[in-house]
Image (cartoon, grey):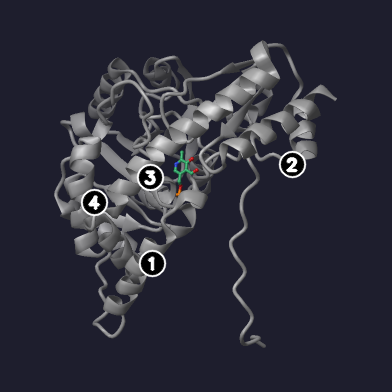
Amino acid sequence: MVSMGRPIEPLTQRPVLAPGVPATDLFPRESWARAIARGGRLASGRKVEDDPLGWKPLRLAIADHIGPSRGVVCDPDQIMIVDGARCAIELILKLLTDPGDRAWLEDPGYTEARQAILHNGVKVVPVPCDREGLMVAQGERMAPSARLAYVTPAHQYPSGIVMSAKRRLDLLAWADRNAAWIIEDDYDGEFRHRGTLTATLASIDRSHRVIHLGTFSKSMFPALRLAYLVLPPKLVDPAAALRFALSGHTGVTAQRGLAEFIISGQFAAHVRAMRQAYGQRQQALLTALDLHFSDTILIGPDDTGLHMTGKFAAHITEAKIADALKRSGVGAKPLSAYFADPNYGVPGLVLGYAGWSEKALSEGVRKLASALAN
Ligand SMILES: Cc1ncc(COP(=O)(O)O)c(C=O)c1O
């Protein structure tokens, strides 16, 4: 039986240094609560809006935002609102692949994308990454006629590499030649700390092979479960039909709340403020790593995002890393876990810095260093 009057428990906070956690402590809760309340008032009592592409004013607001911020110029009717990036990846796999097909995945890569590919009976082709990102020529040797490639060009997950302009062009040329599709997962591309922004694949795709994917999990918070796809024109109708058949559409209240948040300018202001805060938090993490690890850990590219990687300079066993993480209680992840074959992975850590104060980050690093030393 439901007990009345029991307070709803707060959402649990992830342990310090866990990758992928934005700054919920700095989130503008009051203005978000007002936007959501307004979205709820508008949504209730009206005819159910059952557009599988999502609520049109939100799609318009996203189109207006990603034009200038990501160079993705599109018609709002190419945008589909989905329940998070993982829902988007699942939908695209169902739409474009058959069991037995092959899909390129960056190695190391996003574990949840790998799982979604495997669940759909598609064979994962783990394409290695070097300093320029996914090694397209290698992918062509391994599986030239793969049906699609899943990539994170703005900030390779988890290594942090920004894909070079040449590799972007090579990847697009491969997709064009083979009538293959590219999922461009732009999960944290808005949080560039330094250097110039590189053009998104979608902004330079002349052959309509790129499906651009954006999520509000980093720019807002992951529990929101709102993301969007920018579909090439010829995929819009089949994707909408599939979405309608699978789950109808995304909840309208949250969509209306988010539209209100974006249109009022609060979203852009929040992203701007977080870009600055994440820059400071990253600096605090770098300082703490320097203090407690000095040159025993080599930091990966750190120009973008909410996390970075650290590779151990000397050999250290995976068992020792796992044990230190457990004993210290910090949420960093072993880098090897992201490789197709963890036995060949590089010993290191994936360190999230966006979600914690500078003091908490420094304390987390101290605990981790002490657990590794003992
Ligand atoms: C590479 C990558 N893509 C997407 C996401 C976000 O997924 P979702 O929108 O399902 O929360 C994450 C979250 O950590 C991620 O690491």
Q: Name the residue under label 4.
A: 62
Q: Mark 2 points at which residue?
A: 329
Q: Earlier in the sequence, mark 3 or mark 4?
A: 4
Tell me the SS state at disc 1: helix
Q: Earlier in the sequence, mark 4 or mark 1?
A: 4
Kindly indicate whether the residue at mark 2 contacts the one at mark 4 (C-beta within 8 angstroms). no
Which amino acid, mark 3? Thr
For the residue with label 2, is its CB less than 8 Å from the closest atom of ligand 1? no
From mark 1 to mark 2, how far is it between C-alphas? 38 Å
From mark 4 to mark 1, how far is it between C-alphas? 22 Å
Q: Name the residue under label 3.
A: 97
Quarter holding the C terminus is top right
Identity of the residue furthest to the right in this view: 374
Of tags 4 and 2, the one toward the viewer is: 2
Kindly indicate whether the residue at mark 1 contacts the one at mark 4 (C-beta within 8 angstroms). no
Q: Which label number is shown at residue 342?
A: none
Q: Which of marks 1 and 2 is nearer the N terminus?
A: 1
Relative vertical location of residue 68 with respect to residue 88 in this rendering, above or below:
above
At x 21% / y 54%, what residue is drawn?
A: 61
Instruction: Indicate the position of residue 21 as horizontal and vertical percent values.
Output: 53, 45
From mark 4 to mark 2, how far is it between C-alphas? 38 Å
Q: Which label number is shown at residue 247?
A: 1
From mark 1 to mark 3, how far is it between C-alphas? 19 Å
Q: How crowded is mark 2: few (under 14 residues within 10 Å), some or many (20 or more)?
A: some
**Left or right, 166 with reference to 14:** left
Question: Which residue occupies the foreground of this view, 170 or 186?
Answer: 186
